[in-house]
Amino acid sequence: MRPFAGLALSLLGLALTPRIDVLAQERDRSRIPEEYKWNLADVYPSEAAWRTAKEALVAKIPDVDPYRGTLASSADQLRACLDLTTEMGKEFARLYSYASMTLDQDTRVSTALGMQQEMSKLGADLGARTSFIEPEILKADSARIFGFVNADKRLEVYRHYLDDILRRRAHTGTEGEEKIIADASLMADAPENIHSIFANAEFPYPEVTLSDGKTVRLDQAGYSLYRAVPNRADREKVFAAFFDALNQYRRTYGTQLNAEVKKNLFYTRARNYDTPLHAALDANNIPVQVYHSLIENVDRNLSTFHRYLDLRRRILGVDTLHYYDLYAPLLKEADLSYTFDEAKQQVLGAVQPLGADYVRTVEEAFTHRWIDVYPTEGKRSGAYSNGSAYDVHPYILLNYNGKFDDVSTLAHELGHTMHSYYSNKNQPYATSQYAIFVAEVASTFNEALLMDYVLKNIHDDNIRLSLLGNYLENIKGTVFRQTQFAEFELRIHEKAQQGEALTGDVLNDLYMQITKKYYGHDRHVCIVDDEIKSEWMFIPHFYYDFYVYQYATAFTASAALSERVLAGDEQTRSRYMTFLSSGGSDYPIALLKDAGVDMTTSAPFELTMKKMNRVMDEIEKILDRTKK
């Protein structure tokens, strides 16, 4: 509970010819039907109502001051202060969500950008005003604080929060130091914000003319779409144009990422941690060995990844696999395309094993406009789920292009949404916000359900081959690719700690070195073409402070849990639903152990590799049977 530290957080009727979702090609937001746009009026009915609520919160800030110096005097004072700041944190999160989502639907709108900037300042002001709380609690005797909790049941909701404060005693400064750290948050989000605005609103994205004579703009959504076109020469052209354009701005992108790393170094030193990795992982009490073990496990299993890459080469029928072949459809005649309404039916069918209440809530997300579906001009790229508006409901941002990967993304983000929905429904606000480490479990769990659902309904070799390949793509993107990013992020922070420069050229060289290792470039498994050195500029997660490794760890956890649920294990299903409802009521490692998986061991990763090899065995049998 640190409310002001910043906010992160049916194939049964499948045809073999693509269905085109016309709306996915429309870029004018005003022409998108309302049913496919989220309804932010559920948060605040208007910008004026948002501003009224913001001013009410600003007026409430001085109410914190009388508690200064009194927290250890009585249980009543401690509880009243925590109740007040928790309520303000809840309102701040709602305000911030409205501002950020308003901006994300069109990053070119300056008033929305101004609203987000206002919230960043307000968050810094709140953080500074409440900066006395944790140092004051730390000054008190632990027995006295927990004596208050034991004596006043109304404090029980804060037990985990108080335990976490005391656990981090060595990394909490004096009141004055905490105020300086809180004030520094005024600058802390600058690298990410500059990167987001530059990448989404102002970058001069290139255009290319494809082999059919069509000229397309390669913005981020366009690149994600056209990198997967069937024509190989077109893919090569798309990759070269997109990344060469990025490379022209490597000095700017390098400066942005260097600023992010320097920010992390500041907090590392201010909090008295050995490394930025220690600082980032300790927030959720995750041992750093979990991070290092992931990289080591992946490094030991690169031969399994290379087996997948060789299968992709064989299916595509090319002599040598190139990086620009990694997103190509495996089978031209099984180019799986879906309208968004078809995608909804896929997901609803897939999540049936989780029970009627889960399915009902997913239906509500579809019918009550929780989701902003299609890419439009100026809209933030990528996809996310935002569950920060505690008293409302979660929201999902998509950039839906009609491919199976987009259906999988929908299932993924609905996993996050359901995690937030159940946590907000079953936990008080103080323990509702789950840690990032467990966040990706629910999302990748849903991806596993989706893949199982579609495979059970498809027996055609070509389509099954495509879907099994998509499953391997998922492992590639979630386990191997994210670990590749995690290693890059670790190395750039190590370089910065050692006083080395992080220019665009340095980052290009390092990214290329790591990417070549992962893809077996020197062994001719997959050729990593020169322009790929600029791919790091395309990854916004490098501004999320050691976030990406959790995609991989969560994938292995969800693989273990989902297989049991799909096998009909009712006890695991029940424990999983309890996990979704637990929010941040305990440390992530403990919550996952209660759900039935121990992330301090290599067992979940080893299980994932075994499943990956089983899938590749089936693919090879199909290839041998069909003589591909």
Image (cartoon, rainbow, N blue to C red):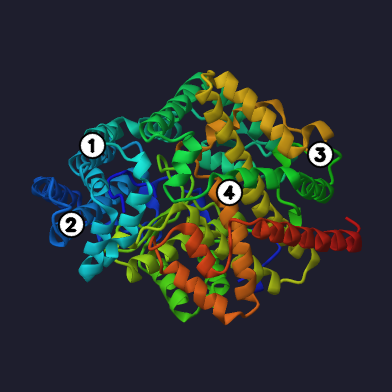
Residue identified by numbered label 1: 121
Q: Residues within 10 Å of mark 4 (few under 14, many from 20)?
A: some
Residue 290, label in figure: 4
Of badges 4 and 1, nearer the viewer stands 4
The answer to the question of whether label 4 and label 1 lie on touching residues, with beta carbons closer than 8 A, is: no
N-terminal-most mark, 1 or 3: 1
Image coordinates for residue 204, horizontal then vertical, percent = 48, 27
Q: Amino acid at mark 1?
A: Lys
- Judging from the image, what secondary structure is the residue with disc 4 in? helix
Q: Could you tell which of marks 2 and 1 lies nearer the N-terminus?
A: 2
**Disc number at residue 339?**
none
Quarter the C terminus occupies: bottom right
- Can you say whether 249 is above or below 267 in the image? above
Say whether residue 185 is visible.
Answer: yes
Q: CA distance from mark 3 to mark 4?
A: 29 Å
Separation of residues labelled 4 and 1 (CA atoms): 35 Å
Residue 377 at x, y percent in the picture: 42, 41
Q: Give the distance between the C-alpha atoms of the residues marked 1 and 3, in whole angstroms.
A: 49 Å
Estimate the x, y position of residue 336 in percent, counting from the top left. Answer: 66, 59
Q: Which residue is mark 2?
A: 78
Task: Give the residue pinned by disc 3.
Answer: 525
Which of the two labelled residues, at mark 4 and mark 1, occupies the earlier sequence position? 1
Q: Which badge, 2 or 3, is on the more N-terminal residue?
A: 2
SS label for mark 2: helix
